[in-house]
Amino acid sequence: MANHKSALKRIRSNDKKRLLNRLQHKTTRNSIKKLRDLTKKKDAEKLFPSIISLIDKLAKKNIIHANKASNLKSKLTKHIESL
């Protein structure tokens, strides 16, 4: 257990940040799954920009690696083109 006030505060703030990061990451993963389940190209193209935005935000905040974000965007683009 931490002995200093600043260390206790750091534990609290890290916990809040961790929960927020988990929420954002899970939300993005769910929306990616929703996009992959779509069968109509028009619907997928409509949803695509918002998902790209979510992925970019995660990469910017270092929740996911920049290369993983690029890979996800590339695979989603290929998936939409194949519909």
Image (cartoon, rainbow, N blue to C red):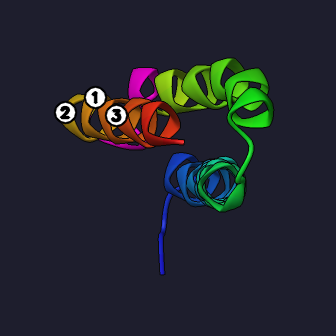
| Contact between labelled residues 2 and 1, with CB atoms less than 8 Å apart | yes
Residue that label 3 marks: 69
| Contact between labelled residues 3 and 2, with CB atoms less than 8 Å apart | yes
| Contact between labelled residues 1 and 3, with CB atoms less than 8 Å apart | yes
Give the amino acid type for the residue marked by disc 2 in the picture.
Answer: Asn
Residue at the left extreme, as displayed: 67
For mark 2, give the secondary structure. Answer: helix
Give the amino acid type for the residue marked by disc 1 in the picture.
Answer: Ser
- Please give the label number shown on residue 67: 2
Residue found 56% across the figure and 53% down from its top: 14
Residue found 70% across the figure and 53% down from its top: 39
User: Does residue 12 lie above or below 51 as drawn?
Assistant: below
Q: Quadrant of the C terminus?
A: top right
Determine the image quadrant of residue 75: top left
User: Does residue 79 lie above or below 67 as drawn?
Assistant: below
Give the amino acid type for the residue marked by disc 3 in the picture.
Answer: Ala
Neighbor class of circle 3 (other Cα within 10 Å; few <14, some 14-19, many 20+) is some
User: Does residue 42 lie above or below 12 as drawn?
Assistant: above
Near-viewer residue (10 or 28): 28
Neighbor class of circle 1 (other Cα within 10 Å; few <14, some 14-19, many 20+) is some
Is residue 25 rendered to the left or right of residue 63?
Answer: right
Q: Find the magenta span and give its range.
A: 59-65
Is residue 3 rendered to the left or right of residue 44?
Answer: left
Residue that label 1 marks: 70
